[in-house]
Image: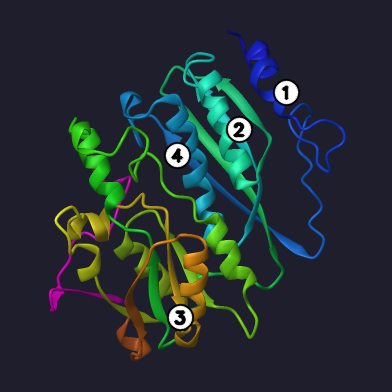
């Protein structure tokens, strides 16, 4: 299939037509829906074969779901409402992995997440399949979540079960698929989108925001918490007993450094805990209270901002999280 036929078959039918309040695929550039008093929120993410996955790890439908759910996780961490995305593709052949099954899953995710394909680009490549997803969202101006808002005494909460994605990825890489949930349902292949619960939390600001600061857990719980603390000028103590406390639970290393969970790590005000729990139940969202933002002499926290406790003892760590360039050093 050549490029023109691929675009006519899979892209132009998703242009939205002239009646929509945006201009999607088919012109030189996209025009997004009007944002009124909101601020646009933009992020880009990549999935590259050989770097993020091997060809046999994901079928075409699961590749599509993982691409969108992982890419839009950054919008969840900003408390933003998702609008749409641009998709840039470099592939050795068409349709290849990007045929009927891939696009059917894209359509299903778009319907579920309330998003639109706004446009993109496709190019031939002699190398591996490379997908780059640029996500557009919107948030009421001045009410976005940031990493820099955590305050002393805030509680630290995390959605889902960090480490389950790393546990699944290691089993998939080792060929131990028999120990996994049905194909495409494990937490690495199909991360859970937290857009809905994030939007509900962002909108439930009656007497002020519930969430003080947030970050999505993509590179590992430890390093992403370090980033939140650094941005906020704070330090934190966490206890991961609840995350490793069952026979089937991930290991401490998987929880802290595995990454690719795409869960939300949030600092919230203590008096907002009941409201948070109520919203989480409404959106069937598992969560754990894992720690607190500590007080500290700011001069003493240029390093070691996060203290991790396990089984009542402080856990010493050398590796903090995923570094894609570590292999080159």
Start and end of the magenta stretch?
Answer: 302-326
Give the residue at mark 3: 273
Q: Which mark is residue 107?
A: 2
Work out how far the residue at label 1 is from the one at label 4, CA to CA, in angstroms. Answer: 23 Å
Give the residue at mark 1: 12
Q: Which mark is residue 239?
A: none
- Magenta segment's dominant SS is loop
Give the residue at mark 4: 66
Residue 308, x across and y down, in percent? 22, 73
Work out how far the residue at label 2 is from the one at label 4, CA to CA, in angstroms. Answer: 13 Å
At a point 37% along the width and 29% down the height, the residue shown is 58
Figure quadrant of the N terminus? top right
At a point 51% along the width and 46% down the height, the residue shown is 71
Which one is closest to the eye, mark 3 or mark 4? 3
Q: Is residue 156 above or below residue 198?
A: below
Q: Earlier in the sequence, mark 3 or mark 4?
A: 4
Decide if residue 221 is on the left or right side of residue 149.
left
Q: Earlier in the sequence, mark 2 or mark 4?
A: 4
Residue 319 sits inside the magenta stretch:
yes
Q: Earlier in the sequence, mark 1 or mark 3?
A: 1
| Crowd tier of the residue under label 4, counting other residues whose Cα lies within 10 Å: few below 14, some 14–19, many 20 or above | many
| Crowd tier of the residue under label 3, counting other residues whose Cα lies within 10 Å: few below 14, some 14–19, many 20 or above | some
Work out how far the residue at label 3 is from the one at label 2, CA to CA, in angstroms. Answer: 36 Å
SS at circle 2: helix
Q: Earlier in the sequence, mark 1 or mark 4?
A: 1
SS at circle 1: helix
Whether residue 62 is visible: yes
Decide if residue 174 is on the left or right side of residue 81.
left
SS at circle 4: helix
At a point 56% along the width and 57% down the height, the residue shown is 196
Residue 227, x across and y down, in percent? 40, 67
């Amino acid at each position: 299939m050549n490029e023109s036929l691929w675009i006519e078959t899979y892209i132009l039918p998703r242009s939205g037509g002239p009646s929509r309040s945006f201009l999607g695929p088919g012109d030189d550039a996209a025009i997004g829906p009007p944002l009124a008093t909101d601020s646009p929120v933009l992020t880009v993410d990549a999935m590259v074969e050989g770097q993020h996955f091997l060809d046999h790890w994901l079928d075409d439908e699961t590749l599509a779901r993982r691409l969108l759910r992982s890419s839009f996780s950054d919008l969840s961490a900003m408390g933003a409402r998702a609008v749409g995305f641009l998709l840039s593709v470099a592939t050795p052949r068409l349709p290849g992995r990007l045929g009927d099954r891939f696009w059917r899953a894209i359509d299903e995710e778009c319907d579920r997440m309330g998003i639109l394909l706004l446009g993109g680009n496709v190019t031939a490549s002699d190398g591996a399949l490379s997908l780059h997803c640029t996500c557009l969202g919107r948030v009421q101006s001045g009410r976005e979540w940031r990493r820099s808002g955590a305050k002393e005494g805030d509680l630290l909460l995390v959605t889902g079960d960090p480490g389950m994605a790393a546990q699944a990825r290691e089993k998939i890489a080792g060929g131990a698929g028999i120990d996994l949930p049905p194909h495409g349902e494990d937490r690495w292949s199909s991360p859970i989108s937290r857009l809905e619960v994030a939007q509900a939390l962002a909108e439930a600001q009656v007497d002020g925001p519930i969430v003080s600061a947030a970050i999505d857990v993509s590179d590992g719980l430890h390093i992403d918490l370090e980033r939140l603390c650094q941005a906020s000028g704070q330090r934190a103590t966490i206890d991961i007993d609840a995350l490793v406390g069952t026979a089937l639970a991930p290991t401490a290393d998987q929880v802290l450094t595995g990454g690719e969970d795409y869960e939300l790590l949030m600092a919230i005000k203590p008096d907002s805990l009941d409201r948070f729990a109520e919203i989480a139940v409404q959106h069937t969202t598992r969560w754990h209270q894992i720690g607190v933002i500590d007080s500290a002499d700011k001069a003493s926290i240029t390093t070691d901002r996060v203290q991790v406790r396990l089984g009542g003892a402080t856990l010493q760590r050398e590796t903090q999280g995923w570094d894609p360039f570590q292999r080159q050093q």
